[in-house]
């Protein structure tokens, strides 16, 4: 599907758009792009006006001239909504996209109808620093990411294949230093104070093989009235591992299934 572009404050942002109905914004995980929603994009478009963004620095979006925090990525999504004349949307974010969704729900509640947090990295300060230190060897001296092996990708996908690894590493290379920059943004963001500020209906979704699945209870306790679901045989990017099961749970939460 061809991407469109919109000029925002920090450069051009690439996005996919399709479908009709209530607005649904999809925010991808670290390393990759809006292409990660390919298997679920058209089915979601049967009931929703779907927008999948390439995060600044990733995919076909421009690389910002300054470093970004999670709050900056969130501001870009809000700018996108304003430019596209989207008053309110359902926001579905995967991994770092889930952190952006958390910040949107907390800081811009008037813009968010419902939240879907997929593989949300709800780590405390020590865990965030430990995770960043663990990843240090996966970058060269210029800060560019090294390719990940099939073994490495078992932390992301339930069933990594050579084809999936090739796709992932190509996008990882395309993002370049923005993989590390975004990891720094993740390590500096504490989602726990923001959870209590979220008042909209929220679905917390994890794959059963996601190492972050253990964070489910903490997020449920932090976001009052939220609900959760665990997808079987799925990893950190369940919309790729189990697209049909992902669609079933998302559409059930959103009320598309009666």
Image (tube, grey):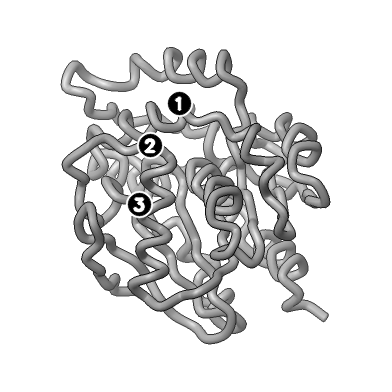
Examine the image and state in which quarter residue 23 appears. bottom right
Pointer 3 or 1: first along the chain = 3
Q: Looking at the figure, which quarter contains the N terminus?
A: bottom left
Mark 2 highlights which residue? 69
Q: Is residue 186 left or right of residue 89?
A: left
The Cα atoms of the two marked residues, 2 and 3, are separated by 12 Å
Label 3: how many residues lie within 10 Å, few (<14), some (14-19) or many (20+)?
A: many
Q: In this view, does 66 lie to the left or right of 31?
A: left
For the residues labelled 1 and 2, the Cα–Cα distance comes to 8 Å
In this rendering, position of residue 33 left or right of residue 10: right
Residue 55: mark in rendering:
3
- Which image quadrant for residue 115? bottom right
Percent of width and height locating residue 64: 21, 45
Where is the C terminus found, in terms of image quarters?
bottom right
Quick one: label 2 or label 3, which is nearer the N terminus? Answer: 3
Q: Which residue carries the number 1 mark? A: 188
Residues at marks 2 and 3 touching, judged by CB atoms closer than 8 Å: no
Choose top left, top right, bottom left or bottom right for residue 116: bottom right
* Residue 168 image point, x, y percent: 37, 44
| Circles 1, 2 touching at the beta carbon (< 8 Å) | yes
Residue 176, image x, y percentages: 23, 36
Dot 3 lies on which element?
Answer: loop
Q: Where is residue 92 in the image (x, y as percent from the top left)?
A: 57, 58
Relative horizontal placement of residue 174, taking residue 182 as reference (left or right): left
Q: What element carries label 1?
A: helix
The answer to whether 3 is drawn above or below residue 241 in the figure is below
Viewer-nearest residue: 112 or 93: 112
Q: Which of 189 and 1 is in front in this view?
A: 189
């Amino acid at each position: 599907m061809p991407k469109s572009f919109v000029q925002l404050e920090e450069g051009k942002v690439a996005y996919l758009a399709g479908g009709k109905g209530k607005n649904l914004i999809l925010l991808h995980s670290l390393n990759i792009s809006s292409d990660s929603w390919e298997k679920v994009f058209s089915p979601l478009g049967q009931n929703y006006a779907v927008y999948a963004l390439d995060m600044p620095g990733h995919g076909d979006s421009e690389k910002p001239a300054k470093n970004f925090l999670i709050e900056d990525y969130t501001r870009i999504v809000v700018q996108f909504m304003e430019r596209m004349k989207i008053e309110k949307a359902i926001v579905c974010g995967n991994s770092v996209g889930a952190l952006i969704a958390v910040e949107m729900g907390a800081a811009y509640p008037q813009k968010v109808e419902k939240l879907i947090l997929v593989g949300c990295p709800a780590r405390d300060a020590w865990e965030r620093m430990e995770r960043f230190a663990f990843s240090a060897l996966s970058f060269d001296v210029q800060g560019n990411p090294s390719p990940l092996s099939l073994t490495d990708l078992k932390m992301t996908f339930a069933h990594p294949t050579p084809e999936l690894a090739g796709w992932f590493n190509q996008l990882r290379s395309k993002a370049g230093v923005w993989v590390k920059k975004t990891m720094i943004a993740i390590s500096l963001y504490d989602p726990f104070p923001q959870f209590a500020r979220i008042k909209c209906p929220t679905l917390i979704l994890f794959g059963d093989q996601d190492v972050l699945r253990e964070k489910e209870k903490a997020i449920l306790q932090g976001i009052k009235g939220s609900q959760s679901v665990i997808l079987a045989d799925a990893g950190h990017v369940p919309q790729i591992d189990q697209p049909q099961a992902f669609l079933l749970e998302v559409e059930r939460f959103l009320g598309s299934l009666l």
